[in-house]
Image: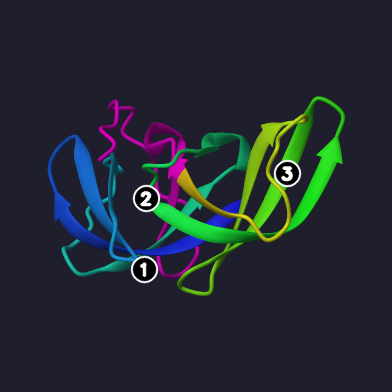
Amino acid sequence: MNFLDAMVKGTSDQHLCLGLSNGASLTVPAPMEELKVGEGIKLGVRPEHVALDAEGELQGEIDALEHLGPRAYLHAALQDGSRLVAQADGDTAIRIGDRVAFRIRSQAVHLFDPAGRALTRSGASAIAH
């Protein structure tokens, strides 16, 4: 699982707006636990829930590739120094050194408090922006 630093920018009953360390925003289903604006949390996302997307909220440089038959894992160094692994088709044309953008499937993220405890998802559908 990928772990990224995030900060709570806004809350509602059904959604939580997060600021990522690169300045991008991501709206995800609100957890059952109450969070305060300005609170730092960890966002967890599995490689299969990260897609290559030219309009994606995260950008990075591919520094390793794992080809595993029908799928490949793309390892990237993001602009803020953090790391991200994304799953792609096994026949991807992406190569080491390529600069690419990624989009996180926001309804599939996991949230963790500063102590590392998983927050309970509310089950609401997410809105990505």
Mark 3 neighbour density, 10 Å: few (under 14) some (14–19) many (20 or more): some
Element marked by disc 3: strand
Residue at 78% x, 50% y is 65
Tell me, yes or no, whether the highlighted magenta stretch contains residue 6. Answer: no
Rendering coords of residue 117 (x, y %): 48, 58
Viewer can see residue 117: no
- The amino acid pointed to by label 2 is Glu
Horizontally, residue 88 falls left or right of residue 114, namely right
Mark 3 touches mark 2? (CB < 8 Å): no
- Mark sitting on residue 21: 1
Q: Is residue 96 above or below residue 74?
A: below
Horizontally, residue 121 falls left or right of residue 16, namely right
Horizontally, residue 74 falls left or right of residue 68, namely left
Question: Which comes before the other along the chain, label 1 or label 3?
Answer: 1
Residue at 15% x, 49% y is 11
Mark 2 neighbour density, 10 Å: few (under 14) some (14–19) many (20 or more): some
Residue named by callout 2: 57
Element marked by disc 1: loop
Assign the magenta stretch its main secondary structure: loop
Tell me, yes or no, whether the highlighted magenta stretch contains residue 115. Answer: yes
Viewer can see residue 58: yes
**Inter-mark Cα distance, 1 to 2:** 11 Å
122 or 91, which is in the foreground?
A: 91
Quarter location, residue 47 = top right
Q: Residue furthest right?
A: 69
Element marked by disc 2: loop
